[in-house]
Image (cartoon, grey):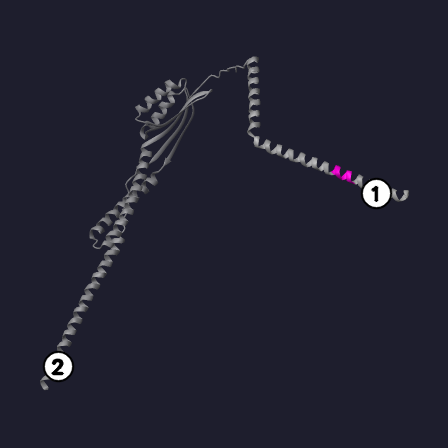
């Protein structure tokens, strides 16, 4: 009996010791998992919200970005010969024609040409075009300073590229699929913005590098009066007869075309005539009946007096 009690106490003590060890292992495992979760959360926050790129304020001198546009209207003696000179001038200054519109009226021949020329050759080419003219009818030069916009677009492009590099580094460090997908989504948005900014910067560079000249060339024409040739009397008479006959034929065909209307009118006319005829007969019968009644009454009154 004593041995049995000692065995029972020994089993309880061993169970207590094993339970304490398992609790300690579970607590240690939970601490490890918590540390892993915290590390993952910090990594997600860093992946989704990278530190903004530092903007270095540069003091470098930036060239002015000017867009030049000219409108010039010139009169020439011969528009065909002048057009050849204009083409030669455009080629000599490394320019090109964007569009052209030609018009031919009774008073003048004209051509509207939209020309692109390197900005360095703008003034020289404008002077050369004026020298071709017999008379410069109109000339206007407009300038647009886009330096501020150019700097803003260039800075935006530089910052977007820095942010793109930051996300690429975070993508290399990402370990979970969720973080990878979020970073790739952000990268797609940033690259779309970079492409749009690059397009705008390219457009500004092109507008600054190549100036625009809207050239209008015209050649006045002498007005010549041309008397209108009138037809003779017999031609006009023949035309009147033909027109009258065509009118009669058209009217006759129109009458045939509305034949259902004629049927309706005929039916209506016969119906009206039938109604009027019956009405007259009815009135005539009524008058006859009245006369017969009067005659009978008169005869009835005369018979007693004779007796």
Crowdedness near tag 1: few (<14), some (14–19) or many (≥20) residues, C-alpha within 10 Å: few
Asked if the magenta segment contains residue 285, the reply would be yes
Label 2, secondary structure: give it.
helix
Label 1, secondary structure: give it.
helix
Does residue 24 appear to the left or right of 204 in the view shown? left
**Residue drawn at point x = 35 percent, y = 34 percent:** 67
Q: Which residue is mark 1?
A: 297
Give the prevailing secondary structure in the magenta stretch: helix
Q: Is residue 64 visible?
A: no
Q: Which residue is mark 2?
A: 8
**Residue drawn at point x = 20 percent, y = 66 percent:** 31
User: Which tag is nearer the camera, tag 2 or tag 1?
Assistant: 1
Q: Nearer the viewer, residue 30 or 60?
A: 30
Which span of residues is magenta-colored? 283-289
x and y percent of residue 41 in the render? 24, 59
Instruction: Tell me where residue 132 sits by quadrant.
Output: top left
Crowdedness near tag 2: few (<14), some (14–19) or many (≥20) residues, C-alpha within 10 Å: few
Q: Is residue 268 above or below residue 300?
A: above
x and y percent of residue 306 in the render? 90, 42
**Residue drawn at point x = 18 percent, y = 66 percent:** 29
Does residue 287 appear to the left or right of 121 in the view shown? right
Q: Nearer the viewer, residue 48 or 216?
A: 48
Q: Nearer the viewer, residue 158 or 5?
A: 5
Does residue 208 appear to the left or right of 249 in the view shown? left
């Amino acid at each position: 009996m004593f041995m049995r009690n000692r065995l029972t106490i020994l089993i309880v003590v061993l169970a207590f010791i094993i339970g304490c060890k398992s609790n300690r292992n579970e607590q240690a495992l939970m601490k490890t998992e918590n540390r892993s979760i915290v590390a993952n959360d910090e990594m997600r926050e860093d992946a989704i919200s990278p530190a903004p790129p530092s903007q270095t304020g540069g003091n470098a001198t930036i060239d002015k970005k000017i867009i030049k546009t000219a409108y010039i209207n010139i009169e020439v003696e011969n528009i065909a010969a002048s057009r050849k000179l204009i083409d030669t001038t455009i080629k000599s200054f490394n320019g090109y024609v964007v569009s052209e519109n030609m018009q031919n009226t009774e008073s003048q021949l004209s051509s509207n040409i939209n020309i692109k020329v390197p900005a360095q050759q703008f003034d020289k080419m404008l002077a050369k075009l004026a020298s071709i003219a017999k008379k410069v009818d109109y000339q206007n030069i407009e300038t647009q300073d886009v330096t501020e916009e150019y700097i803003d677009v260039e800075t935006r492009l530089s910052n977007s590229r820095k942010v793109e590099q930051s996300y690429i580094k975070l993508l290399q460090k990402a370990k979970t699929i969720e973080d990878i997908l979020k970073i790739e989504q952000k990268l797609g948005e940033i690259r779309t913005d970079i492409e749009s900014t690059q397009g705008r910067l390219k457009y500004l560079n092109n507008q600054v590098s190549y100036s625009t000249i809207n050239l209008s060339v015209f050649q006045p024409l002498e007005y010549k009066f041309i008397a209108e040739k009138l037809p003779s009397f017999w031609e006009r008479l023949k035309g009147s007869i033909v027109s009258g006959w065509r009118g009669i034929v058209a009217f006759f065909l129109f009458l045939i075309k509305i034949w259902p209307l004629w049927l309706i009118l005929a039916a209506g006319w016969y119906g009206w005539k039938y109604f009027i005829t019956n009405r007259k007969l009815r009135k005539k019968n009524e008058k006859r009946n009245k006369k017969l009644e009067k005659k009978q009454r008169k005869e009835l009154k005369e018979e007693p007096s004779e007796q």
